[in-house]
Amino acid sequence: MPVLSPRFEEALAFAARHHGGQVRHNTGTPYVSHLLATCAIVLEEGGGETAAIGALLHDVLEDQPTGRGALREAFGDEVYRIVHDCTDADAARRTHLTWWERKREHLGRMSSQAGPQSLLVIAADKVCSLQSLVDDLHRFGPMLFERSARTADELLWNYREVLGVLERRLGDRPVVARLRRLVEQFAALAVDPRR
């Protein structure tokens, strides 16, 4: 059973400082809720403190102007590697790449370079994000996509591709099975939004 040290508390504070003003784009929910939920899934899946810290910080390079050196210095090489593996592109680089370019490049890195701890965090992140999306579809219906930068078909493509990588690399862990069920639910809702 992993014991959480003051290092975990530092990561919680770091995440809260960096993401404190950020909200989820479709609902306005404080973004830190996603980080906490992702971390909880990692811990429930047996991930240790390093993976849990990686979960708390997994979006800090993507969403915030955070230096890679500062992240590595604060939390070490292992946490840095997890966050790097979870990042499709740094905040500054995102403006120079299309969504498709970012997702395809990230899928390639997930398939060949990401380690088991990184894949666990990625799986937990996708479960958390897709569960929120499915819940929002139940609450708001298809008009949810009127405010979305991505179509349902685009999101479904990406979640299916990520699921394929995780099935190959992680096997049938509970978090992968949970993601598979959520992809099926999302596909059903996206095809027939009356459900």
Image: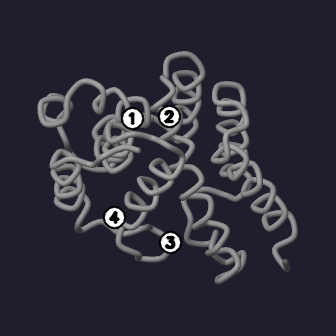
Write the residue at 66% across / 51% down: 155
Residue nearest the viewer, comparing 166 with 147: 166
Question: CA gap, disc 4 to disc 1?
Answer: 20 Å
Residue on which disc 1 sits: 89
Task: Find disc 2 in the rendering and name its residue.
Answer: 102
Q: Along the polypeptide, which appears first: circle 3 or circle 2?
A: 3
- Could you classify mark 2 by the number of other residues whose Cα lies within 10 Å: few (under 14), some (14-19), or many (20 or more)? some
Residue located beneath label 3 in the image: 26
Under mark 3, the amino acid is Asn
Residue 45: percent from left, percent from top = 54, 46
Please give the label number shown on residue 139.
none
User: For the N terminus, which image quadrant?
Assistant: top left
For disc 4, the marked residue is: 32
Mark 3 and mark 1 in contact? Answer it, CB < 8 Å.
no
The reply to whether callout 2 and callout 4 are in contact (CB within 8 Å) is no
**Residues at marks 3 and 1, CA–CA distance in whole angstroms:** 21 Å
Label 3 or label 4, whichever comes before in sequence order: 3
Q: Secondary structure at mark 2?
A: helix
Q: Is disc 3 in contact with disc 4, using a CB cutoff of under 8 Å?
A: no
- CA–CA distance in space, label 3 to label 4: 15 Å
- Distance from Cα at disc 2 to Cα at disc 1: 7 Å
Cβ–Cβ below 8 Å for labels 2 and 1? yes
Specify whether 102 is left or right of 36. Answer: right
At mark 1, the secondary structure is: loop
